[in-house]
Image (tube, rainbow, N blue to C red):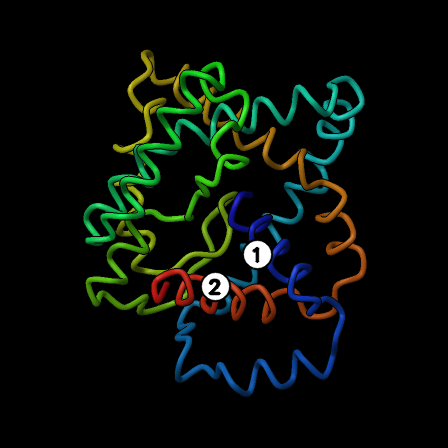
C-alpha cells in the first residue's frame, strides 16, 4: 500500500483533492500519449482489488493497532525503518552522480544510527541533514530509462516499467532483505508497511470516502511525482 499512500499524501499536500476542474485539466495535460496505459482494464481492476484489501483486511487491523499503540512508539518504529532505507538512498544518489546528496545521506545515517539510538530518533533533520527521497527507479530515470507504461501492482499500488525493473536492486540495498529465514524477512517488511499505513490512516480514509476519480488522479500524480524526483 505504500505507493497508494504516498500518492494520496501528495494529492492532499498540493490541495488537489476533490477538485473536478483540476481533474479535467490534469487529464488533458497528461494524456494517454504521454502516460501509456496499455493495461488500463487490469490496472483499474487491481486498483479496486487493492482498495478492497485495504477496506476489509487492513482497515480493521489498523484501527486496533492505532488504538493499542502510542503515537510516539509508531513514530519511533517509522524512524527506525526509514533509517534502514538510508543505504538504498545513499547508493541511489551515488549511482546518480549526486555526490553531495550521497554524503548528506551518509551523515544522516551515521548520526541517527548512533545518537538517534539506531534510528529510532531522527536527530539529523533538526541539525540540517534533510533526507532526499531516492531509489534505483529514480536513478534509472536519471540515466534516461523511460517509465514506458503505467502498471498497478497487487498491494503495492501505482508503478511503471522502470520502477518495476528497479525493484530487485531496491530490495538488495535494504538490510532486512538478508534476514533468515525468508518468512522472517517478509514478516518484518510487512510490519514496516503496516506501521507506515497506520501513520496515514486518517488521510487514506478521507481520500477513500470522498474521492471523485481516484484512478486518473493517482495515475497522473504518480507519474508527475516520479518525474519531478528524477529532475531534482
Q: Which residue lies under the disc numbered 2?
A: 225
Locate residue 82, reporting x and y percent: 47, 32
User: Who is closer to the viewer here, 75 or 170?
Assistant: 75
Q: Residues within 10 Å of mark 2 (few under 14, many from 20)?
A: some
Q: Residue at x 65, y 65 (%)?
A: 14
Secondary structure at badge 1 equals helix
Marks 2 and 1 close (CB-CB < 8 Å): yes
Q: Residues within 10 Å of mark 1 (few under 14, many from 20)?
A: many
Q: Classify 190 as above or below 94.
A: above
Secondary structure at badge 2 equals helix
In the image, taking residue 118 as reference, residue 53 lies left or right, namely right
Residues under labels 2 and 1: Cα distance? 8 Å
In the image, taking residue 42 as reference, residue 25 lies left or right, namely right
Q: Which residue lies under the disc numbered 1?
A: 7
Locate residue 145, reporting x and y percent: 22, 65
User: Who is closer to the viewer here, 134 or 154?
Assistant: 134
Figure label count: 2
Q: Residue at x 33, y 47 (%)?
A: 135
The disc placed on residue 166 is none
Q: Looking at the figure, which quarter contains the N terminus?
A: top right
User: Who is closer to the viewer here, 126 or 22?
Assistant: 126
Amino acid at each position: 500500500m505504500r505507493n497508494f499512500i504516498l500518492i494520496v499524501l501528495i494529492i492532499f499536500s498540493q490541495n488537489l483533492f476533490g477538485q473536478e476542474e483540476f481533474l479535467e485539466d490534469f487529464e488533458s495535460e497528461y494524456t494517454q500519449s504521454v502516460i501509456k496505459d496499455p493495461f488500463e482494464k487490469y490496472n483499474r481492476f487491481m486498483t479496486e482489488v487493492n482498495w478492497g484489501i485495504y477496506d476489509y483486511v487492513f482497515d480493521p487491523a489498523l484501527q486496533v493497532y492505532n488504538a493499542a499503540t502510542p503515537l510516539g512508539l509508531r513514530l519511533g518504529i517509522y524512524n527506525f525503518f526509514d533509517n534502514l532505507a538510508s543505504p538504498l538512498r545513499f547508493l541511489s544518489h551515488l549511482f546518480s552522480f549526486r555526490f553531495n546528496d550521497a554524503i548528506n545521506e551518509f551523515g544522516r545515517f551515521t548520526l541517527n544510527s548512533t545518537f538517534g539510538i539506531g534510528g529510532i530518533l531522527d536527530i539529523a533533520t533538526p541539525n540540517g541533514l534533510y533526507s532526499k527521497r531516492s531509489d534505483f527507479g529514480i536513478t534509472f530515470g536519471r540515466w534516461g530509462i523511460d517509465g514506458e507504461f503505467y502498471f498497478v501492482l497487487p498491494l503495492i499500488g501505482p508503478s511503471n516499467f522502470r520502477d518495476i525493473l528497479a525493484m530487485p536492486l531496491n530490495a538488495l540495498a535494504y538490510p532486512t532483505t538478508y534476514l533468515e529465514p525468508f518468512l522472517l524477512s517478509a514478516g518484518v517488511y510487512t510490519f514496516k508497511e503496516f506501521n507506515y499505513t497506520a501513520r496515514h490512516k486518517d488521510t487514506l480514509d478521507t481520500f477513500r470516502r470522498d474521492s471523485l476519480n481516484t484512478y486518473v488522479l493517482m495515475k497522473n500524480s504518480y507519474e508527475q511525482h516520479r518525474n519531478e524526483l528524477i529532475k531534482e
